Image (cartoon, grey):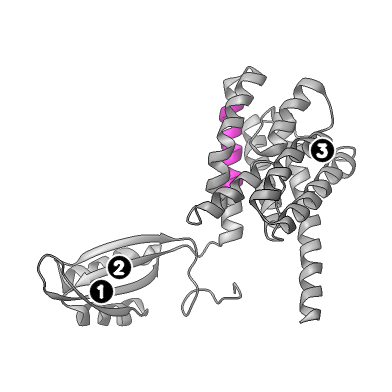
Amino acid sequence: MNQNHQMQQIKNVFFLVLGSVVYGIGTHSFVMPANIAPGGAVGLALIVNYLSGLPVGILTIFLNIPLLALAWFMLSKRFVITTGIACGVCSVILDFGITPFLPVYEGDRLMSSLFGGILVGIGMACIFMTGSTTGGTDILGYIMQKKKPHISIGKALLMVDGVILLLSIYVFQNVEAGLFGLISLFAQTRVMDAIIYGNDIGSMVTIVTRYPEKITEGILVELERSATVMDAKGAYSGADVKVLLCSIRKHEFYKLKRIIYSADPNAFIMVTETTEVFGEGFKGMDGQ
């Protein structure tokens, strides 16, 4: 157990440093030259940097202090400590390990927004996997997800960071700053969700039918998947029915719909998107 804990700590340090480096490259080489502020404390820091010229990393630390104080009461103290460490590492690497040595991209602004968002999203995902954040509105996103667990981290950050995009339009005096910032933020959140939640996105299909045998046979034979069958009763009709639960990948839904329709055209179907599916035919609990 102690050895496993040590290995996990080593992995956390590795991902923290790796994420901070990638995050710093995306911020310095792509986001800053595009004059955009795609959310987070670093977005606010970029706005203040544009007005004052002060280093982005140091500004990020100062802007995080009140948010870390809020997290001390709303989230766990361990979370605040790890986030403070992550924020410090990110800021130091950005100001002293990235900015003095790496060039900036001075090409197309759209390309800066996209590549900046992708790199920042990869960096943030690596840091998030250590159980920490880069601070800033990431903290508010974690608080929102804690209150509403069905909201993914990426979507929570997208909602919280919208106000920073509006502020960037006012400060940079350029509507395109908000539009390019939105592109960067969208790329960031999509990459982050793909890394954290995985690409094995599927659908959970709930089927209410009087002919479960034909449907389950089609699922087993044609889709080579399984289903869970439960007894139920219609509230209005009082008739006995069966409820089938089946998890499939998105590209399999059309075939499943055909199987259901051929067996029971009057079946009632509900489809729910899932961020990840674990189990036989999908991923194991270890993520493999």
- Residue hosting label 3: 57
In the image, taking residue 93 as reference, residue 148 lies left or right, namely left
Q: Position of residue 67 (x, y in %)?
A: 70, 41
* Residue closer to the observer: 17 or 132: 132
Of the numbered discs 2 and 3, the one sitting upstream in the chain is 3
Frontmost residue, 288 versus 1:
1
Instruction: Identify the image quadrant of residue 46.
Output: top right
Q: In the image, what residue occupies the spot 61% across and 31% down? A: 164
Expressed as whole percent of the image width and height from the top left, the position of residue 214 reads: 20, 80
CA gap, disc 2 to disc 3? 49 Å
Crowding near pointer 2: few (<14 within 10 Å), some, many (20+)? Answer: some
Q: Main secondary structure of the magenta part?
A: helix
Do tag 1 and tag 2 residues touch (Cβ < 8 Å)?
Answer: yes
- Are circles 3 and 1 on residues that touch, CB within 8 Å? no
User: In the displayed image of the protein, which residue is found farthest to the left?
Assistant: 237
Q: Which residues fall within the magenta stretch? A: 177-189
Which amino acid type is marked by label 1?
A: Val
Q: Which residue is mark 2?
A: 206
* Crowdedness near tag 3: few (<14), some (14–19) or many (≥20) residues, C-alpha within 10 Å: many
